[in-house]
Amino acid sequence: MNTLPDSAMKLSSLSIFFPVYNDWGTITSMAAQAITAAEKITDDYEVILVDDGSEEKTQEILTFLESRFPQIRVIHHEQNRGYGGALRTGFKEARKDFIFYTDGDAQYDVRQLLLLAAAMNDGVDVVNGFKIKRHDPFYRVVLGKIYQYTAKLLFALPITDVDCDFRLMRRKIFDTIELTSNSGTICVEMIHKISRQGSKFAEVGVNHFFRSSGKSQFFNFSRLYHVARDFSKLWLRLVVRGEGRNAKA
């Protein structure tokens, strides 16, 4: 496991957000670890929990966290908008100079945010994690590798692992791009658009763990058709037609 740095870059301010969909079993510890990590790298931070239409049990936990911790703010979607919809809300609601996000299902260790902060410097706009080893069922590992290499080839992505949702970014990069995807293809859309505008990337290896709560909305057999459809439409829009090259969010 990576050794966390004794010190990381002090960030001027930081928004941490988690897309949450029925992650009742993990989100409390994730939020607590986010607060602990944030306090080591900045004096000005917020934690945003984007509830994407979760069931009542998860909503009750989110309400408790918001009432207990002044740093936490909960945004509710009355209906599920998909992973992309949850991320778009998180980026829109973030108020600080830097944004860090990861999923609320504890497949990543939030404390490794310190590794990303250590790699952030004046010449870097995005620090993207990559999974040192993916801990998922075999079929998800295979599907993930196919998706990762296909996306990298078709969209000329500058990073190793577009499927690793463990990212630290400067908020200002979203002043000049507009994200439209509602599914998990938003990650490909985001990295492609950020890269196209000339932003600089750094990469850091992070640990990945088996899912202990919640349910994937992206890589599962019942959704393969929808993923392929959304991926193809995105490629046609961004690469073939070149849409949004000069768009501003």
Image (cartoon, rainbow, N blue to C red):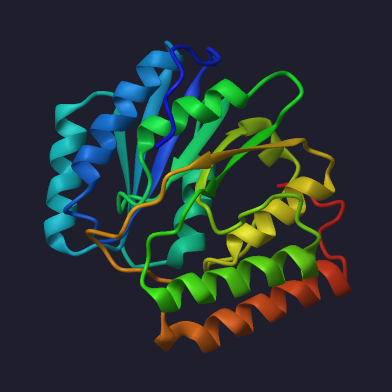
Quarter location, residue 233: bottom right
Please state which of residues 108 and 218 is positioned toward the viewer in this rendering.
108
Q: Is residue 185 left or right of residue 16?
A: right
Give coordinates of residue 91: x percent, y percent. Answer: 53, 43
Q: How many marks?
A: 0
Instruction: Tell me the residue at 44%/33% (across/down).
Output: 2
Q: Is residue 40 left or right of residue 204?
A: left
Q: On screen, 157 above or below 114?
A: below
Q: On screen, 112 above or below 118?
A: below
Q: Is residue 5 left or right of residue 233?
A: left
Quarter of the image containing the N terminus?
top left
Please state which of residues 107 and 193 is positioned toward the viewer in this rendering.
107
Residue 19 visible, this orientation: yes
Instruction: Tell me the residue at 51%/18% (across/down).
Output: 13
Quarter location, residue 163: bottom right
Please state which of residues 181 and 101 is positioned toward the viewer in this rendering.
101
Q: On screen, 56 above or below 194?
A: below
Quarter location, residue 154: bottom right
Give coordinates of residue 86: x percent, y percent. Answer: 44, 56
Q: On screen, 97 above or below 108?
A: above
Residue 248 visible, this orientation: no
Q: Is residue 240 left or right of residue 7?
A: right
Give coordinates of residue 244: x percent, y percent. Answer: 81, 59
Instruction: Tell me the residue at 39%/51% (across/down).
Output: 103
